[in-house]
Amino acid sequence: MIQYYKLQITDKNVLDNLDKVTPWWTRKVDNKLKKSRNMILKFGLNPNDFIKFSKSSETDYEGLIAGVNNYLNFYIPKIKIIVSNRVAFKKFDNSIINYMNLNGYVSAIQTIAEFYYSNKDDEFNQITKINAVKFANNKNFEKWKRYQKEVISNFGGNDEIKNNLKKIFSEVIEFKKDLFDPRVIIGVIVKYSSRLFKANEITEQQFLNLMYFSYLQLSYIEGFIDIYIVFLNNLK
């Protein structure tokens, strides 16, 4: 599922709209880049084979997006191992959180550029907080729907569990004036699955799959909101 979070390639003329804002995200992005490169080093590999820069200032936004995507080449071959048992998962959990936070940061940066570009002919009368919220929510709700699909399908033909999960998912409310934030619901999903696993009602593999899906979505949205909320706070 991590491939689904691969950042879309954004045209330079769209990214040029980031000149309209001060990049408040630099230190946060650089911190995650450093941790990502250190993770690669722990495996005896050259970080430059995956991310060719140590700081965001050493590249442009196109290069940043490409670098974050290229880091997936480090992860993808290891996914089956990561979700194979709890020991392997625990070894990688912090690095998954770090990468998905970084992914969320850069996705938010892209969204800011895309939002400005989409309103380039409106003489800025559409550059409002409520429109910026709607724009971001439309993007992130698509990822949320994919998360729901993966979680429910993880439990095969167990209709009772699947129906319970659907009820939990139905509690999500998308507010027009607030950023879409499903973190509480994800927490409920994780707790419910933990109870099932302890009661031997689901397999370890099903539980680890659920945890993996949840780490991806939770860490992504956490990173996205962390960056995008600052943008919103500067709009009317």
Image (cartoon, helix red, strand yellow):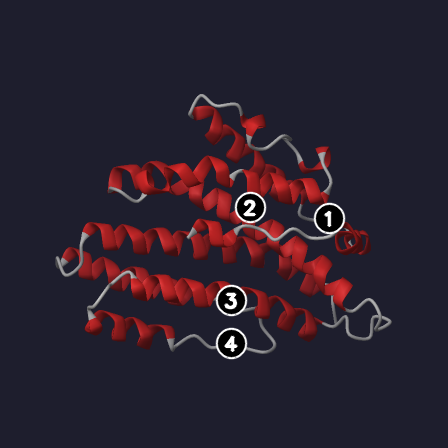
Residue beneath disc 1: 23
Number of the label disc, if any, that sits on residue 174: 4
Instruction: Name the kind of residue labelled 3 in the image.
Output: Glu
The residue at the point 52 percent across, 48 percent down is: 101
Q: State the CA–CA distance, disc 2 to disc 4.
A: 24 Å
Q: State the CA–CA distance, disc 1 to disc 4.
A: 28 Å
Counting residues from the N terminus, which is met first, the one under dot 2 or under dot 4?
2
Q: Residue furthest top?
A: 44
Residue closer to the observer: 154 or 32:
154
Residue closer to the observer: 26 or 112:
112
Q: Residue 116 lies in what quarter of the image?
A: bottom right
Instruction: Specify few, some or many for label 1: CA neighbours under 10 Å numbering under 14, 14-19, or 20 or more.
Output: few
The residue at the point 68 percent across, 38 percent down is: 56
**Which of labels 3 and 4 is toward the front?**
3
Instruction: Name the kind of residue labelled 4 in the image.
Output: Glu
Give yes or no for contact between labels 2 and 4 (Cβ–Cβ under 8 Å). no
Counting residues from the N terminus, which is met first, the one under dot 1 or under dot 3?
1
